[in-house]
Amino acid sequence: MALNVGVIGAGALGTAIAQTMSENVDELLLHVRKQDLCDDINNTGYNTQYYPNNKLNENIKATTDINDLKKCDIIFLAIPSSAFRETLKNLKEVLEEETIIVTTAKGIEYPSLKSMGDLISEYFDENYVALSGPNFASEIMLNQPTITNIASRKAENSQKVKEVLSTKQFKVKIIDDIKGIELCGVLKNINAIANGICEGMNINENARYSILTRGFKDTIEIIESFGGNSDTAHEYCGFGDLIMTSTSSESRNHTLGILYGQRLVIDEAASGIVFEGKNSIRAVRDICENNNIDSEIVNFVYDVIIERIAPIKAFNKLWENIE
Amino acid sequence: MALNVGVIGAGALGTAIAQTMSENVDELLLHVRKQDLCDDINNTGYNTQYYPNNKLNENIKATTDINDLKKCDIIFLAIPSSAFRETLKNLKEVLEEETIIVTTAKGIEYPSLKSMGDLISEYFDENYVALSGPNFASEIMLNQPTITNIASRKAENSQKVKEVLSTKQFKVKIIDDIKGIELCGVLKNINAIANGICEGMNINENARYSILTRGFKDTIEIIESFGGNSDTAHEYCGFGDLIMTSTSSESRNHTLGILYGQRLVIDEAASGIVFEGKNSIRAVRDICENNNIDSEIVNFVYDVIIERIAPIKAFNKLWENIE
């Protein structure tokens, strides 16, 4: 394929996507923050930090120099939402305006309440594509069957990204709802935390699945209130990612919820881990308030994680109000 | 409450619902097939077969005589769908036409393709109510928080059933889509089997949650093709029960799928267990064919369980066609 493709962020997902796309392109550039990891990748062929046992394809080249990305037609931003704006500023100095930026991050900037797509369009106009689905990175890295959704403001951009991403095992379905796909990515983390809190408290399954049902309905309501399409909630990026994130023990936000449900508070700085969902809670709560949406699930998560209300007290309030 | 209420079937769900409703009525009649279990319940206060450790409320009276149900205003049929028609015939001899019949069974009669509600209306006109939700019986028995949906053809019947069922811990939400609630109950079992087969084969989570997403979309399509409301799929009886049945290790149809995925075939007769989902596969497949719906998920389950095609072969076909 004649397209030049780069990935920024050599974490679990960035590396896995790079590995997948390297099947379709001559050379794949992987931008890495740390020089030692960059050297490891180029010298040994392994991302020693994330995938010590999976050899990278030989046409993946790591770099720490953002100028190397200048020639890229498509760039995947596989970085935490907290690092998004800073990275976009740096990219703006280097890239052409028509470069397609693909975001895998799920988050909302606080207090601006801008989505990752909104941030990209500040710097690169409408040339962005959002990618989301029930996609554990480790499984993508192992070339196991995976489907993802992508959406953008320009049909030809979605088409290009689909071409560069699709392999026999990695399927890409284009949908036409950029707002919906972004909201699904943010809201599933709230739901995963909510379900995790209940699990941590040993709340029974009938109640947990009912709370998840309520969360799914709230997701649809929020999507629609932003002019998104409720069908998006039925998609891989909606239903699929929501239930994976909320029920699988592999999900980070789900785990965060479990710990809070057990009244254990994580030191994120010391752990060096970013919980996207936690950072989004304030933002989602504001979004609901601004749009007169009263989501019991959002309130529940806000009460437990931000207000530090005792989980059982928060749960009793939720259960009283749920219907 | 002045209403007379009976439950037919002292299995896990019938007993649990009887226990819940006994909080609301003076006396609750529980119809039991076997005399020894009936005696156990009346003499010891325990359903020794299903709940040896949970004492039944004292106003639950067991009987083996169907004539005792004559005075009931509402009767819950908590029996397998395979025993439905026979039981209705017997009830018809005894009950008044205006008795409200509530069905908890999920199934479709084969080859007539009639739902349990269709069967009830053959004998009792339109006086039936369907109940469905993410409701593990053992949790209801323990008085743990639970929500269920009910639907009927007559609003006053739904209201009466809601009154007799609702407690602080057991919530009842009325919806206005009898066709949708019945279809959700049938289709979730197909999805649970599909997901179980994949789990039994050790298919990765990205693929499994995508298959479940596809199954949810097919559920919506099938509901709509029968004039049901797609909102029903978002309800506790839809989304909630679908994901519980498909992801919880407590679900019987899920377990059936896992065993088939491992190529283990259960002797149902020797096990004395009825897998509602298995009995419904042929029926659902016919329903799809009659309505020109091509559901890859239904085909997959049919291929593995009925046609006994090797699971990996069936999965490869599914994965090729899924989108």
Image (tube, coloured by chain):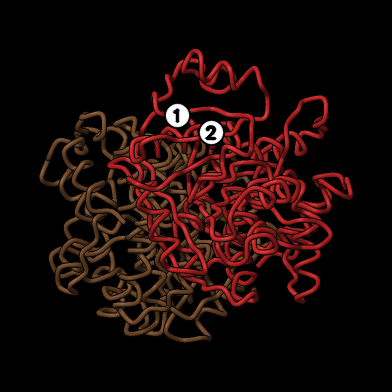
Chain colours: A red, B brown
Q: Quadrant of the N terminus of chain A?
A: top left
Residue drawn at (12%, 40%), measured in percent from left and top? B308
Q: Position of residue B256 (x, y in %)?
A: 30, 39
Task: Answer left or right for B186 relative to B139.
Answer: left
Q: Dot 1 falls on which chain?
A: A
Mark 2: few/some/many CA within 10 Å (<14, 14-19, 20+): many
Q: Position of residue B57 (x, y in %)?
A: 62, 50
Q: Dot 2 falls on which chain?
A: A
| Residue type at tag 2 | Leu
Task: Answer left or right for B105 relative to B136.
Answer: left
Look at the numbered disc 1 and give the secondary structure of its residue.
strand
Residue drawn at (22%, 48%), measured in percent from left and top? B320
Which of the pair B203/B166 is nearer the observer?
A: B203
Would residue B57 be visible to someone looking at this image? no
Mark with earlier residue (2, 1): 2
Look at the numbered disc 2 and give the secondary structure of its residue.
strand
Q: Position of residue A22 (x, y in %)?
A: 39, 35
Same subunit: marks 2 and 1: yes
Q: Residue under label 2, please give it.
A: A30
Q: Which mark is residue A290?
A: none
Q: Quadrant of the C terminus of chain A?
A: bottom right
Q: Position of residue A223 (x, y in %)?
A: 60, 70
| In contact (CB < 8 Å): disc 2 and disc 1 | yes
| Residue type at tag 1 | Ile
Question: How far apart are the two marked residues, 2 and 1, measured between alpha carbons?
Answer: 7 Å
Q: Residue under label 1, please give it.
A: A60
Which of the pair B234/A255 is nearer the observer?
A: A255
Residue drawn at (73%, 43%), measured in percent from left and top? A83
